[in-house]
Amino acid sequence: MYQQRKNHFEARAKVLKALAHPSRLYIVEELEKGERCVCDFADEIGADISTISKHLSVLKQAGLVIDDKRGNQVFYQLRVPCILNFFGCVESVLEEQAKEHNALLGR
Amino acid sequence: MYQQRKNHFEARAKVLKALAHPSRLYIVEELEKGERCVCDFADEIGADISTISKHLSVLKQAGLVIDDKRGNQVFYQLRVPCILNFFGCVESVLEEQAKEHNALLGR
DNA sequence: AAACTATTTGGCTAAATTGCCAAATAGCCA
DNA sequence: TGGCTATTTGGCAATTTAGCCAAATAGTTT
């Protein structure tokens, strides 16, 4: 059952891995508001532009964003509109953790 | 805007990272059907039991599963019920990729 | 063409992840 | 107690990832 669908699990994992980085999560959240160019992120995140560019490349490889070069800037936008809902569950995991943490502290 | 919520993005990323592995995705999918013990997975996945145990530990650390020792077995179950919906979006990313791939091949 | 801006790529090091084996731990049963 | 089963932990090598700098590429402007 695992071996037969191994490729499928690997493909899923690749998408999740692309999302599993704080800077990339921020980028995805920002892109939900609309397209952005690379330079928009560099200041906000506080990393080298080449680092941001590589993060965007990871998201692109995973099929999460598409890029569009206009002039000498490259604009990125989300390719799949459902990412935000996607995080509802992640949040509920974090909430459960918070609850338990508080319970352990006797609150 | 990023710096202020950095901790939040890091917490989210941790959860996603825990899910971002083919074997762990399989485990999560199986756990949706009900609790399982460690040994159930070893044969199916074809990895060393210690490897499976470590995967389960990663899921536990991330708050995704809880464990319950009964006798000399340890049973794991999902802690958060929404994980399955969670994958709807991942699937749509994969479908988009497939579409584009076919388009490039002129199908 | 030269200077300038925006982005990507290559190279490097440091850190994290994966998965195996061997050893340790815990519970059960004779 | 001793042996057996199930699971976890420690240690190790191989692979991957992250992020910086420097260099390359592409487009714009003078």
Image (spheres, coloured by chain):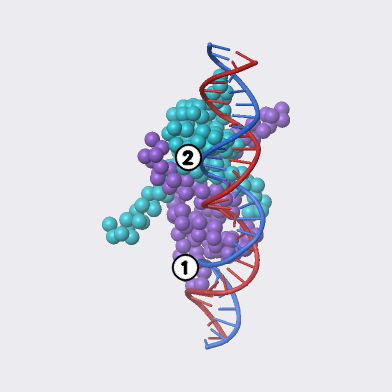
Chain colours: A cyan, B purple, C red, D blue
Chain for disc number 1: B
The image shows residue D6 at horizontal and vertical percentages of 55, 69
Report crowding for label 2: few under 14, some 14 to 19, many 20 or more residues within 10 A (C-alpha). Answer: many
Report crowding for label 1: few under 14, some 14 to 19, many 20 or more residues within 10 A (C-alpha). Answer: few
Which marked residue is nearer to the observer: mark 1 or mark 2?
2
Closest to the observer, A20 or D27: D27
Q: What residue is shown at x 67% (from left), y 51% (from top)?
A: A4
Tag 1: amino acid: Lys
Image quarter for residue A26? top left
Q: What residue is shown at x 57% (from left), y 23% (from top)?
A: A69
Helix, strand or loop for disc 1? strand
Quadrant housing the N terminus of chain B: top left
Marks 1/2: CA–CA distance: 38 Å
Q: Which residue matches tag 1?
A: B69
Tag 2: amino acid: Ser
The image shows residue A54 at horizontal and vertical percentages of 56, 37
Q: Which residue matches tag 2?
A: A23
